[in-house]
Image (tube, rainbow, N blue to C red):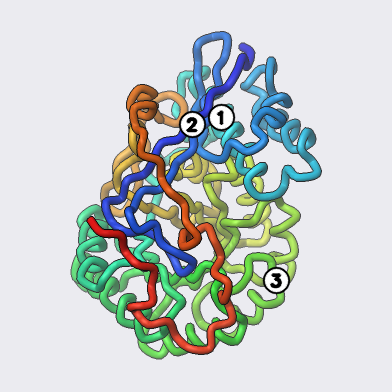
Amino acid sequence: MRITGYRTMTTVQEWGRPVGDVNGVFADGTVPVPLVLVDTDEGITGVGLGPQVEIDTVFAAIEGEDPRGVTALYDRMLRRTFKVGHAGAVFGTIGALDTALWDIKAQAAGEPLWRLLGGRDRRVPAYASGLDIGLTDDELVAVYQVYAQHGLRAAKIKGGLDIERDLRRLTLVRDVLTEAGQGARPGLMLDVNEAWTRKQAVRHVCELERTLDLTWIEEPVRRWDAEGLAAVGRGIRASVATGENLTGLEQFRPLLAAGAVDIVQTAVVWGVSHFLRVSALAHAHDLPVSPIGGTPVALLHAATSVPNHLASELQNLHPPLGLSLDLHVEDGAVVLGDSPGLGVTVDEQAVDAFHRPAVRTAESPDVRPEHAGRRLLAVADHSLPARSPG
């Protein structure tokens, strides 16, 4: 079997409501989802979700190769782009192609990826994550009631702009999950997406912990600040979670050496091989791992095969436009199916027929605000990114 070519396309995740975080909001709830399809001479096509930056350069490292040698091909892609390969979107392109190769390998073996990787249990524990900073309190409650109906008993909300608002919203979500769980204490997490200084982080979380039991605080300071993350961890009761924006093991090592992280995260956009390697490194430090991502199907499969998986982020309960996924959510877990490979089917005609592009603005979650980490006063509710009409 040989790799013969690739195709790229972009679909969207339509939330039907505003989604975002402390950095900004997609007001119309339409989020772009780039896809990479890798073709072979035996008619098997693999699907990867992730960037397409410098893809001609990256793909040249694997063109004509046997896709089943995916681990070696992953390193080959890193070597081909070694000056930029461990950075940002190029690393994401490598991850998308890597995911597609794992998909091909499992399809060729006639097995779902979770079984090919050595997983035993197809059930992957999950927590709810609504990207909910742009919602009113009533909308927030309604969203997490739906998650609760699927058995989810842990939730991560977005915050970081105002202590009182975060306290109120975390309490609302706690009450929803407690009622659904017939009084059982839920897991509560707060994600602030690198919005604070070290002192802000400790002060904010300690105030929340006067009345709430937080499981973790996510990305309280900048992702690379090992000393700062460790200082935050020493100053609060909650665990510190980070890693979704780190690329390459060399970026994780300083944090682990400094005792700066309690929950090691990695994003689906960086691919399966990256997740497996980070998981092994975390396991060597007796730390759990938690995958992150909007459509994390590849890392859900991989999570079944590592001994230190804690829980995976579950965002939208519906797949992106034109994609069908062989999985379902029940009793607080994602249950993977038996389709060979990832179990992702792409309706290329449906994707091609969609002509309304997702628009990224200066207020999107991907753009760091000018004054992030330098706010003297809390941001009031009315100062959150405006919602578009309709």
Position above or below: 307 against 189 = above
Q: Which of marks 2 and 1 is in front?
A: 1
Image-based side of 351 in relation to 74, left or right: left
**Residues marked 2 and 1 touching at CB (< 8 Å):** yes
Q: Where is residue 125 in the image (x, y as percent from the top left)?
A: 39, 52
How many labels were placed on the picture? 3
Image-based side of 162 in relation to 366, left or right: left
- Residue furthest to the top in view is 42
- The image's mark for residue 349 is none
Position above or below: 370 against 126 = below
* Nearer-N-terminus badge (1/3): 1
**Residues marked 1 and 3 touching at CB (< 8 Å):** no
Position above or below: 185 against 284 = below
- Residue 55 in which image quadrant: top right
Q: Marks 1 and 3, Cα distance to the nearest angstrom? A: 32 Å
Q: Where is residue 302 in the image (x, y as percent from the top left)?
A: 52, 41
Q: Name the residue under label 1.
A: 102
Position above or below: 98 against 225 = above
Q: Mark 2 points at which residue?
A: 113
Crowd class of label 2 (few under 14; some 14 to 19; many from 20; radius 10 Å):
many
Secondary element type, mark 1: helix
Q: Marks 2 and 1, Cα distance to the nearest angstrom? A: 7 Å
Q: Residue at x 73, y 43 (%)?
A: 85
Q: Residue at x 41, y 85 (%)?
A: 163
**Residues marked 2 and 3 touching at CB (< 8 Å):** no
